[in-house]
Amino acid sequence: MTACGAVGVNTRVEDGYLPRPITEDAELIRNFWVYTWIAALLVGALVLALSFWCWAMYRKKKGDETLPEQLQYNIPLEILYTIVPILALAALFFWNNKVAATAMGTETEPDNVVNVVGKQWSWDFNYTSENVHEAGTQAQLTGRPAAEQQLPELWIPVNERTEFQLTARDVNHSFWVPEFLKKLDMIPGRVNTFQVTPTEEGEFIGKCAELCGSYHAQMLFRLKVVSREEFDAHMKDLEKRGQTGTLGNDVNREPIAPADRDELTTTGSNE
């Protein structure tokens, strides 16, 4: 199993062979991908059709000793094939920018905040809104289904907006759940954020998507999207285990810069 591929992820033709989206903004990304491909295929088909038409109409006929009529300058046609691509690219740029702004926007107040910390080669999860945490250890993957039970678990409630505040303890990592249809780098000394609103419950595999060392392929975690009741019960269970407060940044190789540190929610931090 590699952490750079969407191994074991369900894909469908109607999703453009992307992983099936499970969040509100993932639907926008999926639609952008599918309709862009449809437009590209239509343009390609038109270009091929016109090319074959020109070949059929203006090819040299058998027995002809003269070249076909040579045409030069067709101002309306040249204007057409200059303006149309410009308009098409402008529309694509506008749509892409709108989807990206929606998918990566963090202006909306989240219902939950989780500080996800990448480290060689596992994950720590600080549930800063609930003032509890969970520390992951590197999984020893043997290829057997039971081995996945060792993976650290990230819990989030369904139909609620969760903000992920991404940091790294050592080298660059990347937080990726294929069904989100987006990922974001985790850079030492920096705080990167994005938000999701999952629309269905289930269990999904998350992974690091940035080559980060020898055991990069084993840097996996399980995402559990559950009801609010199950989420609250799990938070109380972590509290009963004594996993209160948040794991500090004192073990980071690179201190978080003050400007970025202000973005990081530190409610209940034990630093």
Image (cartoon, helix red, strand yellow):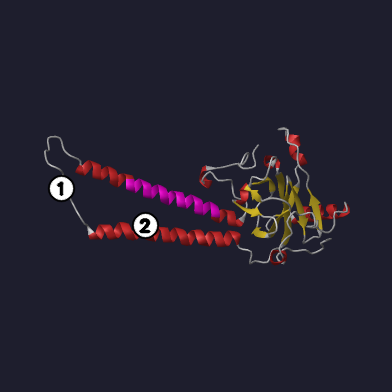
Mark 2 residue crowding within 10 angstroms, few (<14) / some (14–19) / many (20+):
few
> What is the x, y in percent for residue 93?
46, 60
Comparing 252 with 218, the one in front is 252
Please tell me whether residue 4 is drawn above or below residue 85 in the rendered image: above
Place residue 89 in its image quadrant. bottom left
Is 247 covered by the magenta stretch? no
Q: Main secondary structure of the magenta part?
A: helix
Residue type marked 1: Glu
Q: CA distance from mark 2 to mark 1?
A: 28 Å
Q: Is residue 191 above or below residue 63?
A: below
Numbered circle sitting on residue 85? 2
Q: Which mark is residue 69?
A: 1
Q: Is 86 situated left or right of 146 in this image?
A: left
Quarter placement of the N terminus: top right
Image quadrant for the C terminus? bottom right
> Between disc 2 and disc 1, whose residue precedes?
1
How many numbered discs, if any?
2
- Of 218 and 44, which appears nearest the observer? 218
Label 2 amino acid? Pro
Answer whether residue 226 is visible to the viewer in this image.
no
Residue 153 percent location from the top left of the image: 75, 47
Left or right: 253 as drawn, with respect to 182: right
Stretch of the chain drawn in magenta: 29-47
